[in-house]
Image (spheres, helix red, strand yellow):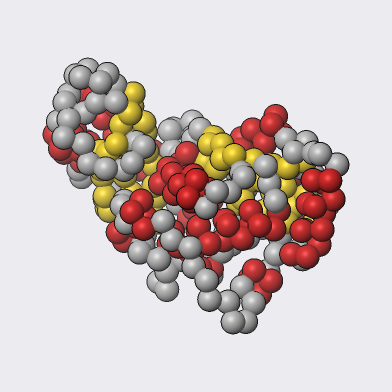
Amino acid sequence: MRLIKSIPQMIKYAKAVQKKGKVIGLVPTMGFLHAGHLSLIDIAKRSCDIVVVSIFVNPTQFGPKEDFKKYPRNLARDLKLLRRMGVDIVFCPSAQEMYPKGFQTKITVPKLAKKLCGISRPHHFAGVVTVVLKLFNIVLPDIAVFGEKDYQQQLIIKQMAVDLNLDVKILTGKIVRERNGLAMSSRNKYLSNLNQERAARLYAALSFGKKLAEQGEKSPEHLRRSILAHLKGKQINIEYCEVLNADTLESLPRLKGKVLIALAARIDGVRLIDNIVVSLGRT
């Protein structure tokens, strides 16, 4: 396994691999890796000859009052995990390398980015999309793998790839959960044992909503209210709970087709997101 910190070195390596006709897979991360990240690496290994994992805590996707400075970091631990996974390249640039003096450009996907997390974090997805496009231009992947926990993010990145005619296939990995159902996240480190159990109620509420929909509930608003009622009094501060078209994030007059149930919440100040997708009939 090789660690690369320089953009020119990464581009040089990627071009040399391309000349050999090998397939490059990229798994972008912000580090502090967990089993969810490792599952995405497994997907890349099955599909690619060379697997590149990027580790970069991207400052432009954090708001001024968010947790950029205290976001969990442990590069030595991450490198040990990635070596065991058989990763070929770890690309770990500095913020100065990615955003040199005079950097101005932002990429936006405005329609999708204004939904869900984009309401409370209006600049977040511009930061995400811009850094992902930079990573695509640096690593030159044929395939990139993202996690379904960040459902809105992977939709936005797929839209960017289509709109900008990027020759990158975007794959999505399923959510990996703790035994209690809590979706794995680097931010789970912030939660006490008690708050981890509280956080697990998010998935319990989503599963309850999925069951209602599969049993024939047709009203998105009634489903949403039922999920919120399921969480009432659980010391969970709900930021949003939405029931939307899973492909477009548009509102639904009735529950049908592919439905996304998504929520964001804070528990003792820690922001968590989770979702579940339900496939229903067309009527």
- Residue 237, position as x, y percentages in the image: 27, 53
Q: Looking at this view, is 211 or 164 the one in front? A: 164
List x then y, in percent, for residue 236: 28, 49
Tell whether 119 sits left or right of 128: left
Residue 184 visible in the current orientation: no
In the picture provided, is 78 more to the left or to the right than 244? right
Residue 138 falls in image quadrant: bottom right
List the single residue furthest toward the front: 165
Picture quarter with the C terminus: top left
Describe residue 168's horizontal placement relative to residue 195 as left or right.
right
Residue at x-position 20% and y-position 45%: 233
Tell me: residue 246, above or below residue 80: above
- Which image quadrant is residue 125 in? bottom left
Instruction: Report the residue at 43% width, 61% height from top.
Output: 108
Residue furthest out toward the bottom:
102
The picture places residue 248, in percent across and down from the top left corner, at 33, 41
> For the point 60% across and 51% down, which residue is it?
29
Q: Is residue 146 visible?
A: yes
Percent position of residue 34, x then y: 60, 43
Left or right: 124 in relation to 244: right
Q: Residue at x 36, y 62 (%)?
A: 121
6 vs 79: above or below: below
Q: To which quarter of the image does residue 98 belong?
A: bottom right
Total number of numbered discs in the rendering: 0
